[in-house]
Structures are given as C-alpha cells and as structure tokens.
Image (spheres, helix red, strand yellow):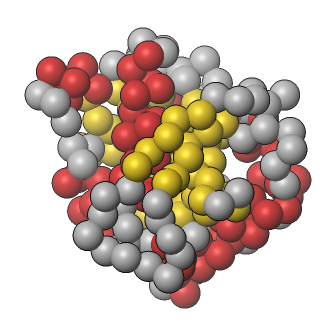
C-alpha cells in the first residue's frame, strides 16, 4: 500500500530559528507505520488558518477515512523532524489524478494536501516539499505540475506564482465553498532555467 524507506535528507540553513531544533529534516514516503490519525490532525491543524478565513478546504475538516482514500491514490510524502511528521504533500501522476480533464492529462502531475505544522510555518519547509514533488514529477516524465487553491487565498496564489506557477483556469469543486484557481508550472523550462 505505502512505499517504505525512500528518504531524502534536507539540511536546514534557514536564517529563521524556531523553538524546535531544525538541524535536519527528512522528506520520505508515508509508510504503513505512520499514523493516519496524526496525519489527519496535522492537515486539519495546518489548514486551520484558511478555515478561520471562512474557506472550506477539504483538509480543514476531513476525517481519517478521507485521508486514507487520498493517500492511497497518491504518492504521499511526509516531512519528518525528530521522528514526528510535521508536514505532508500528495503527488498524483496523470494516471492517478482525478477531478477534471487538465489533471488527467498524462503530462501533468498534481500536487495536493500541502501542509506544514503551524509551529514550523515560515521556515521554508513547504517550499522544500513542493520542490521535492516537482523533482518526482520530472522523474516520472511529467511536463507540468498543477495544483489548485482558493481564489480568496491571495497569499497562497502569490506564493505559488513566486515559485513559477502560472494561472491555468478556474474550477469549482463540489466539496468547497469557493472557486479554485488552478495553477501549473512548466517543469521542463524551469529545469532548464534552474528553478
């Protein structure tokens, strides 16, 4: 069900320091020993700010059953610090993506459920997770990595655009109370430009 023992060590050289000692972060695949209850709690907590903005992202309120379904259909990466999962991102290649036609293109990978524990946000960890997913998508032969976020979440749209993502279209998911902005990054040109 889950892949085991794939690990990438990422050294932390951020200028910011936190109460937690960010000496070393591990990005690895979710495995069967990881707690889906803890992962669900992390997602709910990390998306809490968006919920307080009045945005009904699925991750703000999803239960363990939905988390299980979402990670079983994806390659789920986790960010681990001191044996604790403090971040996550799901990646779908074109053959596993669901939703609408753009996500189902064979040359498009999809990023979803990007989350970092609130106590560690602002330390570049989400950026590291996104870059990790981009590299995986390149290895899988994807030309683009796509994602969506809430149209009112201007701070997130601006953050993704700074990372090279561009507007594709709008989409209305049946489980949200907002219109989504779909963004994608051209992985081929960004690799050539070193981004």
At 83% from the left and 54% from the top, the residue drawn is 36
Residue most toward the left? 193
Q: Quadrant of the N terminus?
A: top right
Residue 116: in sight, yes or no? Answer: yes
- Residue 6, percent from left and from top: 64, 29
The number of numbered discs placed on residues in the rendered structure image is 0
Residue 86 or residue 107, whichever sits in front: 86
Residue 87 or residue 155, whichever sits in front: 87
- The image quadrant of residue 118 is bottom right
- Residue 135, percent from left and from top: 40, 28
At 26% from the left and 28% from the top, the residue drawn is 186
At 60% from the left and 59% from the top, the residue drawn is 81
- Residue 175, percent from left and from top: 66, 60
Position of residue 66 relative to residue 101, above or below, is below
| Horizontal side, residue 175 vs residue 159: left or right | right
Q: Quadrant of the C terminus?
A: top left
Residue most toward the bottom? 52
- Residue 140, percent from left and from top: 48, 15
Residue 104 or residue 60, whichever sits in front: 60
- The image quadrant of residue 18 is bottom left
Residue 172: in sight, yes or no? Answer: no
At 81% from the left and 49% from the top, the residue drawn is 34
- The image quadrant of residue 51 is bottom right
| Horizontal side, residue 16 vs residue 97: left or right | left
């Amino acid at each position: 069900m889950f892949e085991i023992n794939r690990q990438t060590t990422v050294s932390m050289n951020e200028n910011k320091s936190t109460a937690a000692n960010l000496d070393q972060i591990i990005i690895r695949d979710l495995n069967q020993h990881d707690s889906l209850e803890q992962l669900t709690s992390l997602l709910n907590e990390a998306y809490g700010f968006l919920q307080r903005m009045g945005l009904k992202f699925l991750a703000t309120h999803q239960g363990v059953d939905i988390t299980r379904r979402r990670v079983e259909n994806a390659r789920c990466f986790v960010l681990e610090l001191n044996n604790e999962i403090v971040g996550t991102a799901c990646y779908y290649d074109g053959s596993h993506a669901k939703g609408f036609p753009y996500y189902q293109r064979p040359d498009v990978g999809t990023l979803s459920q990007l989350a970092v524990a609130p106590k560690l946000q602002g330390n570049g960890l989400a950026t590291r997770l996104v870059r990790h997913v981009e590299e995986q998508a390149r290895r899988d032969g994807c030309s683009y990595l796509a994602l969506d976020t809430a149209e009112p979440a201007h701070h997130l749209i601006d953050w993704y655009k700074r990372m090279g993502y561009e507007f594709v279209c709008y989409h209305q998911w049946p489980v949200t109370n907002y219109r989504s902005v779909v963004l994608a990054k051209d992985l081929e040109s960004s690799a050539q430009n070193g981004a």
